[in-house]
Each structure stands twice: as structure tokens, then as C-alpha cells.
């Protein structure tokens, strides 16, 4: 798949300003279940920018599109799966429990996605690393079974897509890759 | 406290490119506990930028500095507290268990920080909202007690600082505000 | 053990055959992560139909469509939310973490959906029942805040849609209802 | 919102009406611990039938009968066990802690049942699959020990029966199969 | 280590021998999932009887019968419920998820049973005690809603029966009492 | 298992009265944190004795004595350990965190005790069973490391004693056996 | 808070050597379940004493004695309770499940002890503070019911004793105080 | 273990008074979130000093300094990690989630620190012990991967530093050792 062109660089000045202007952090809906209060004066000072870093995430629209492409790929092969998309911070963005998929599949999918984004590699490759470091698989949140694929920006991981429920991890991972591919189109 | 000048806007073009070039996502240390493998060709396609969004976070250096300023403020008043910094995604960045602080304080601090950043308001204010919506306090991860303060960029929440262990929530929150203030300097 | 006779086929002949032919139970992908084994002879006897009942569920396609309609309704009003769809058995079918929604929102959305489908009523109505039975809210998995709406078939609940992250539960529930409405079209 | 037209009734008219008339979804007892409220008008629109799928479950009467047949089979051989029946969605329908069975047996029985229904195979067979995919056993909710048997309808899994507490997994599984057999009578 | 002398036999000779001969503790099936090993000599010394106490429990057969009587009573009134039986040690003996009962009902039933046996009173009565001690309801494992009833031997609690899913706690408790009554016949 | 003869019935009038007079069930302190209420008439019917079974437990006095003998044995050899006593139902009766013992030791001790009483064998023996059934160790609550010893009455398990913190499981188990031995004196 | 004078420095050279010689930290049993390895040279550098502080704890012998005095006090009044001792760091040192005590009592006792040591006050007093700060009771690990008493050294908390199972919190707390009193003798 | 000489007694009058005067136990901030109450007279009796022991801990200032030295060491080598400091009681004192570190790293770091302080050895050495006792790794809270290093006082463990996120456990542990080294300066 093609690399990002300069023009598709993740965030260029104006775009980001706009994004923030549009309330990336929920400024307009910051309070919940009660009328929005004016933030208290005493703690409202903005932090200086040297204190800040940006992280890159899939939009929920993109993540959902990828998850659906994953389900579609499985459906074509008559397989019943669940799929999840987890971001680089380990938070689940999308979880879809597929029709007729086994009850173990939704959580397995989340864990495979988590594993793929944590090490920035497909879980089928990560399984091999257990030969040298077998206890990697004891790390909380992980699952070392084929079916997880990282989503990357310039080689760095921004998300993982995990699939579970097909008769083999290879098949699961094939569907996960279809989800990744849908993001490059 | 002063607002961000245009020049301190969260991310301007070149800065972000550099940040990503420097491997914001851990590209150089993507694999763990085994030799870095080359990412598998099949799933390496970069996602298109229309699929992406940026979120703003405190650096760990800034968050630690804020937490220490919080501890220092408490020490001046002879109070024993714990402090935590939680980001807008709900992940804990810094947790410090203060000398002699009660055993309940570290987790309380995390929950107050989480609550403040979730609603972008000091927890002392959020307590008042329970009058209309008392069950807000049943939301997992939250604690509706004074002692949490949001960290904001242009009014939007990027983190929360939570404090627990002092004889009152007001005192806890005073120390949390000292932590926020340290970020504006 | 003997196979099901035609006369004991689950539900009625053609309907079930079709349902199974369409793979409702994942017969074609019954094994995971290893080649599909032939089911062991000894335990393969089909159960008699008097032992069976059917339950009705949204397809994942429908649930995802409803969730996206929910997100769209929120976006129109510039609100940042998360949404979940939970089935009548209490299992989460879809969970979407919206862009910029607070970290507390995904789990809150699941719990509101769970609450709505459990009692077959909008959570804004269920809140009122706490006046007579305040401890209802201590039931595990529930959240008694506006924002959950049941999906019904002939008045019976088949799913719940839950929303969290807007400034009020009423607003959350308005978006959940938009998701329900999308299923009726 | 409009009601379902007759033509969009779930599955086919008579069959479903009957099912619903029999109260599959608890329409008559939809609310709990407070007088049944009329469902709120605003969210009551029935979903269209193209959005629906049916899943097949054991009745609680059948599942209890199977569990008791399992206990009886063990008693004949002087073995003390616990037994569980889990449905295809992973929910526990019946759990019986046998007289004198070890304290580890109830949860083990649930996990074996869960494993058998997830992969639609006896757990004694599933153990063998670990040779190729040893980390399957790290999937949450599973237990790869003999003693679990699937309950099938036309080859598709509708439930699992799990047994624990006998001196060997083979013996546990013999009793589980006796439970399955009771459903075919 | 020395064996128990006749005089130190647990409780009184004949009774206990009979009880043990009848296998109260699973002596014949003490090991699980592997051939029964002879207990190691070094730790086999029997404990002296002054160290022992007896506790009374429902048999699983009785508990299952009570649970089914509970389901039957609900069915007569067209109510869909789940039921659980918990012993005086807090362990769940029987859990039945009723057809069409809400997803919140199985765990609610367990907690009501647990609450009733802990305080040896119907949960509808225990709710009233919250007036003086409102935080009783924060005790882990409890649920202060009508629907739990104690099973007693000479006034002392040996088990609790809990019911959930009917439109009111009073109705739930009526069915639980039907289960208790079945034990007295 | 043969039926109890009248003479060996688990609870006959006089015997039970005595047992209750001795307070087996806490009849005098059945209610907590509020004045003892008279049990409600409606549910007070005593269960018939054919529904009952007795189980044997260590008194807390005996269990504490055993645990202290365990600590003493370790102290003589200059070892720092924690110790736990778990009953046949899997409930922890005594847990003592020894001076200077590692933080992992209290929970390890509980799990070893649980394992020993579940299979009625020392955990050092149970470790060997993993050769044939390696996944036994995945059963929740267990720990397959030397250091657990069963307490028996006529060969049947009534409790387990678990020890953790010494440099080897053999040493841990030596101390556990010392605790068992103290019960035989 | 004034600085430590040299003479009151928490740990001065000789004192610490002696304390360690006495094995406070388990130097002689530092490794578990495998032969003691010599600590690796590279990380063995001792930390400087300005980095250290001392905390005061009950010995396990003292804590057990207090717990037994608590049980004895309850027994005299024919009450069945459980008791726990928790240290100032929140770790449970002793947990005893009393004969015939309700199943809810062991965990309640731990939480009351935890609450008492966290705020250095009897839980019966702490209940009153909920009038001003009702959400204090949402802090994880706490239970705001009478029955917890702090153990103090010169007014500072070193442990808490918690009791549960008697008909009132006042009675529970009376027994907890008896445990505290046993430490002063 | 030899007895403490009077001079080294864990708590002698004057020393303890001084230590407490310096506020070791938070006497001045003992109550939280409400005005400090005078401790209740009835339970205020100080415990006798023969009941006490002292344990040694890093100050939070020292632990934070060590954690930052660890992050600095990683930064020099362009590695993205998280770091944690856990005390000998198993409580986490400091947790820092490094910029760009994988989502699995914060909890992995805590577990490595916990493992190192529990056995007083680097986790890279502890991994080797699994050859003889493979189930050590099933002990709750542990992680047997390189990256944890103990902090010692005269050879006894007072804390552990854990690191996760670098491409190998050896590299993780190198950074952890840098944190330990910072305490010796």
C-alpha cells in the first residue's frame, strides 16, 4: 500500500487549528447530564504549550468503516467473527459482535487489537517472539494469537484491528488486514 | 492566568511534523522484549489522513512537574496527600503516593482527576450537579468529592489533577490548583 | 445418539432450515484458530425441539446503523458522545467511542443501554422509579441516568441503545431515540 | 414513530406471533420492582424485521433437566461434581454445585461449558488443538480441560454442558455427555 | 502423624462415620482431572474433634427443587424471573436464568439470596433497616430489594432464595417464598 | 450414595437443637447493624430434614492455632512467611501476613490452601499431576506450587493450610505440615 | 513541617544496620520457591539514607492477639462475628472468619478496619461526617458503618480493627475496641 | 531472629515521639474531607511498643527522582517506556506513563517492580528460576520478564523499580538499574 504523501501528512497547521477550533476536546459538550457550567475561574489557566504533545488517532468514522470492511471480508468467506479497533493508548474505539460469532470472540478481538497496537506488529508475528520471551503473553490485556493487525501512520502505530471467531488465526488476520486496507483507500 | 498566545498554539505545522518525525508513537521502540522485527509487509499500509484526528496531552515531564508542585503545596501546609494526573482519554499519566498519606488516597486521587477531566470542571463544582442528577456519581471511575481540577488548553480539557488525603476536599483542591498553576508558568 | 427427526426440527421446518442454512449459529465457522475438526460423534445428538426457544436480536448491521445514526444526530448538534447497543441477553453488540467524547462515556453508554433493555423503558423514565425503589440502582450493570432507550418488537425489548457524553441526559436520550428511529425506517 | 406493519413482522407472521404471545421477551413483566409502566410513546417504534435475527436457546426447563441428568450419572458412579449449562451467547443458564464437590468445581464447570459451546466441540478434543495454537487457552472465560460437551441443533451449537470435580476430565466429560443425551430423549 | 483415636472422631461416632461413609466430603472423588493419588503420608493426620464444627446445608437436590418451585410459581402468574439459592457460607448452590427474564435478573437473584441468608430475614424487611443504617447496602455482595427469603432450620438460616425479574420486589418475594415452602413439604 | 437412615439423619430434633444451642448458625446474632427483628412469619417454615446435609469445618480457634503453629515453625528456621487456612467450601477462615514476608505471600498462601483442599493433596504432589493435565493450573483460585497441605478427617478434606514466602516450596510446605500437625495434638 | 534533626532522622546508620541485621525485610528468605540466588551485582547499590523513611506496624503476633481478644469479647456476649486488622498502608495483616458469622462479615470487617485506619477515627464517628460529605462513602475500600476502630501510637494511626456480624454496628465496635484495648496491656 | 537490643528497639520513647512529631503518620491530616475530629476517647489507648515493628520505605521524593532518572536514561537511547516504583509491601509509590510508550507498559512496569521487590532480585534473574518452578509466574501481581530491579538497604529489599516498553527486557532493565543507581548518589 502507498505511503503517505507529504500532502497527506497527519496534521498541518491550519487543519489542526481548525480541528481544535471545532472543539476536538469536547469544549462544547464538556459537562454531562446537567447544564454546562462556566468553568471555575481559579483553575482555568491554560497550560503552556511546551507542556503538550499531540497523539494521532483514527476518527470513529474511520474506525467504524474499517471494522465494517472487516466484517464484510469475513462474510464473503462465510465466516462469523467479531472485530475491534483499539487506539495507541489502549482504549477501545469500536467493538462489533458479529452475527453468530462465538461468545469468546468479542473480548478476544479486543485483546488481539490491543496486542497488535502495543507492539506495532501483526499478532501472527508476535506469536513467534514468545520463543525467546514466553512470558510476554502474561502481560495484562494481551492475547498472542493470530488475528490482530496494526494501523500505521508513517510506520508508527495509531491503532490495532483485532478479529476473532474464524477457524484459524490466519483467517482472522486476513480479515483484519482487509480492515486496515480499507483505511488506505 | 494568561491565555495561550497564537504563537503558543498547541501544534503548529512544523512542530508537529518534527514531533512525528521524532517518533511520537514509539516507532523506534515499537517492539518489546525481543529484537525489533520489521513490520510485516502486508499490513503496513499507512492510513489516509482524512481518517485521523489529533488529541492533545501533557508530556510526562509536565505532568510530573505538576504533581510535584501539588505535593510541595501540601507539604507547606503540613498535609499528607497523594496526587494523580489523568489524561482526556482517562489514562493515568502520573500517580504519586505521598509520604504518610492514607491508604485510600492514591485511588481517590486518580478518581478525582478522572472526574475533573471527564466534565472539564473542578470536582467541588461537580458535586453540586448531583442535586439535579444524583446518579451521575454511579458512573464508573468517578468520585464526586472536592480535590479534582481540570487542566485546559483554550478552555478544552487535556488532563485532570486529583488530590486526596487532606482533612477537607477544599484543601485537596487547593493543592490540585497549585499543580495546575505550575503548568502555566 | 439419534439425529433430530424432521418433526422435531426447531421451530417450524422451512423457517429454521433457512435460518440455519444462513448460518445463524456459525456452523461453518464453529472452530476457531485451528482447522475445523469434525464434531465428536459421542456428543453430537441434536436436542429435541421441545427443549428449545428462540430469541430475537438485532443484526450487527442493524445495530451498527442505529449507532451511527445516533452519532450523526449528536454531530448535528455539535455534541460529542459515545454510543452502545446491548441485546436482551445483556451482551454488548456495538460500542462506539465518539471523537472527543469524555473518557467516562463509553462505559456509561453500555450501562444505559443495558438498563433500558432490562426494564424495557427509557432510562429517563426508570429514574423516576427510584422514588419507590431507590436501591434498584444498586443492581450490577445498570446506570439510572437519562440516555438509554429500548428497541422493541411488538412492544417487547430486543435491544437497548445507550448514549453518554452530552451536557444532559435528556440530550443523550434524544440521540438514542434517533438511533432507535433509524431502525424503523 | 410508526408501528411495524403486519408485513414486516419478525420472521413469519404466525410463528412469531405465537412466540411473542407466549411471551418470549417478557412483555408482561418488562418492568421490575415497581408497577409496570406503559412504555414511553416516544421510543416505542418497533424495529423493521430486516434488522432482526433469531437465535436458538435451551429452555431453562430443558437445561435444568440436562444438568440433573448429569448429576445423576455422576452419583451412580459415586462421584461428586458440579455442572453448568451455558448458552451460545456465553450466558450461564444453569449452575448447580453438587453435594461434596470441591470448591473449584462450580466455576470450572461454567468455563468448560463456555469453551465447548464457543468452539462447538468437546473440551477433550479442544485440548488437542493447543498443540498448534497453545495460546488459545489464554482466551478469557475458557478452560481447556476435559469435561465440556456441546449441545447441538443440526450440528450448530446452542449450548454447552460443563462438569468438574471427578478424578479425571474423561470422567467429567462422560457425565456431561449424559446430560446432553437427556436432551435427545 | 497419628490417626484419630475413636474417641476423637468428629462429632459423635456413628453419625459421622455414616456421614463420611456416605461421602460427605468427596473422599472417593477427591482428586480431579487426573488419576486419584494416595494422599501423601506426611500430612494425613486427622484433626482432633475438638477442632471441628458442623454446618448445615441444603442438598443440591433440595435446592434445585426449591428453585424449580419458584420458577413454577412465577410461571403461573405469567412472570419471567431468575432464581438463585445461596448457602449460609455465601456460596451459590443453584442459579437458574429463567426464560425471557431480563439480563439483570440472574445476578440480582444471587445477591438477594445472599442478603437474605446473611441477615436471616426477607429482603423486604431488610430494606426497612436502611432507615437507621443506610450504608448497610454498601456491604459487598448484598442487594437491598424485595425478593430474597431465608431458609431456616429451627429459626437459624441455612440458605437464602433470591428472585429477580418480576415487576415488583413484592412479587419477586412471593415467588421466593413459594420456593421456601416447597422445602417444608 | 445410600440414603441416611433415620438414626443417621443429618439433623434430627435433639441433635440439631443442641447444635443450634451451641450456636452453629448464629441464631442469636442473625441480624446485623440494627435491632434483631423477629423473622417474618410468612417465610419461617423450617425445611424438612431430608433436604439437609452437614459439612465439617475447623473452628476458627483451631484454624488460628494451626496458623500460628505454622508461623512458629517458620520463625525457628528464620523464614518470613504468610499463612492461610481455607475450608472445604473454598472460604478463607484465617489469613495472617507474617512480619517481613514478601507482598506476594498472603494471596499465594490463600491459593495454595485452596488448591490443597480442593484436591485433598499436598500441592507439591499436585504439581506432578500437571504432567498429564497441564491446564489444571488454569482453574481459577488455584496455585500449583509447593506449600499447601490438606487437613483431613478420616481421609476426607476439611481444610487446607497454605504457606508462601520461604525460599522454596518444599520449605513452605514443611511449615504448612507443622500447622496440620498442631491440629492432631 | 519542620525538618528532621540529625538526632531524629528516621534511619541513621547504626540503627538501620541493626534493624536489618534483625532481618526486618526478610533478607534471609528473600527468594521464594527456588534456591536463593546471590543478588545481581549491577543493581545492588544500597540507597542512601536520605531517601528513606520508616513506618510503624503492628507485629503479626500483636495483631493476631488483638483479633483474638476481639473474638473473645464477642463470644462472651454470644455474638458471632468476623474480625480483621489492616495496617496504615491499607494491607490486611489478620483476617479471622468467626464460627457461625454471616458470609458478609469477613469482607465487611476488612473494610471497616480500612476505613478506621484511613481516617484515624472510629467508623461510628466517620458515619457522621457523611452529613457534610456524603460521597466519602464512594471511596474504594471503605465502609461507613460502626465497627471499625483505629490503633494508635501517640495519636497517629498504625492499624485499624474491624468487626462485622453482630446485630448492630455499636456492638461490633465494642468488640473492636476490646481488641484495641488488648494491645495496650 | 535475635531480639532487638534496647538501643535498637524499633520504637523507643523519645525517638518515636520525635518521629511522630515529624509527622510520620500524618497526625495533622488524619481526617479527610471534613474538619478533623478529636479522636474518640474510648479507643485512643496507644499500643505498647512491644507490639510494633518498623519497615523502611523510599520517600516519595526519592522514588520520583529514581523514576525520572529511569526515564532520562531511556530518553538518551531514544526509547519510550513507562516506569513504576513499588514498595516492599507491594504498594505502588510512583507510576509514570512515558510519552509515546505502548499502552501495555504502565501495568507491566508495576508488575515487574512488584516481582523484583517480592524476591529481592532483578526480574531477568527471576526468569531463570522458572526452569525449576514454572508456576511461580502464576502468582498474582507478578510478571517474569526482564525490566525489574530491586532497591536495597544493606541487601534487603525496600522497593522495586520496573520498566516496560523498550524493544527488549534487557534494555528495560538497564533503565531500571539507572533508576536504582540514582538513589545511591
Image (tube, coloured by chain):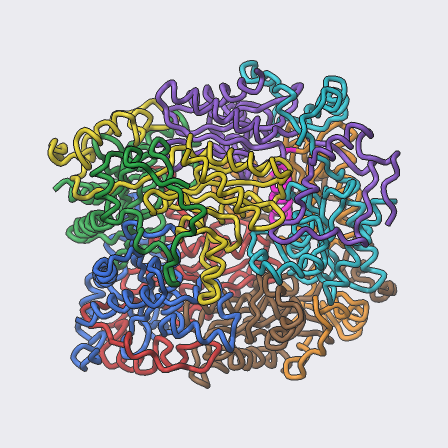
Chain colours: A blue, B red, C green, D yellow, E purple, F cyan, G orange, H brown
Left or right: residue F5 versus residue D137 is: right
The answer to which of E110 and A156 lies nearer the viewer is: E110
* In the rendered image, the vertical position of residue C137 relative to residue B143, given as above or below: above
Residue G165 image-quadrant placement: top right
The picture places residue E75, in percent across and down from the top left corner, at 39, 22
Whole-percent x, y for residue H126 in the image: 63, 73
| Image label count | 0
**Dominant secondary structure of the magenta stretch?**
helix
Q: Position of residue A154 (x, y in %)?
A: 27, 79
- Residue G153 seen in this snapshot: no
- In the rendered view of the protein, which quadrant contains the N terminus of chain G? bottom right
Res H145 seen here: yes
Q: Nearer the viewer, residue D46 or A82?
A: A82
**Where does the C terminus of chain G fall, quadrant-wise?**
top right
Quarter where residue A55 is shown: bottom left
For the residue pair F132 and F107, the one nearer the viewer reads as F132
Q: Is residue E64 magenta?
A: no
At horizontal 22% and vertical 52% (from top left) the residue drawn is C79
Residue B47 screen position, x and y as percent:
23, 72
Give residue G30's quadrant in the image.
bottom right
Report the span colored magenta. Answer: G102-125
The residue most toward the top is: F41
Which residue is situated farthest in the bottom direction here?
A: H77
Amino acid at each position: 500500500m502507498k505511503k503517505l504523501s507529504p500532502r497527506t501528512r497527519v496534521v498541518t497547521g491550519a487543519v489542526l487549528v481548525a480541528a481544535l477550533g471545532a472543539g476536538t476536546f469536547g469544549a462544547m459538550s464538556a459537562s454531562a447530564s446537567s447544564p454546562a457550567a462556566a468553568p471555575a475561574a481559579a483553575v482555568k489557566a491554560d497550560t503552556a504549550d511546551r507542556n503538550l504533545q499531540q497523539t494521532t488517532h483514527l476518527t470513529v468514522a474511520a474506525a467504524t468503516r474499517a471494522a465494517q470492511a472487516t466484517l464484510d471480508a469475513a462474510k464473503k468467506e462465510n465466516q462469523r467473527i467479531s472485530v475491534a479497533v483499539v487506539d495507541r493508548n489502549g482504549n477501545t474505539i469500536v467493538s462489533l459482535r458479529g452475527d453468530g460469532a462465538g461468545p469468546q470472540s468479542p473480548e478476544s478481538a479486543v485483546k488481539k487489537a490491543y496486542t497488535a497496537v502495543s507492539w506495532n506488529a501483526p499478532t501472527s508475528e508476535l506469536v513467534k517472539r514468545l520463543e525467546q520471551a514466553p512470558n510476554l503473553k502474561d502481560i495484562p490485556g494481551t492475547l498472542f494469537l493470530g488475528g490482530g493487525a496494526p494501523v500505521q501512520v508513517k510506520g508508527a502505530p495509531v491503532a490495532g484491528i483485532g478479529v476473532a471467531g474464524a477457524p484459524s488465526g490466519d483467517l482472522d488476520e486476513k480479515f483484519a488486514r482487509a480492515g486496515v486496507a480499507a483505511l488506505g483507500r
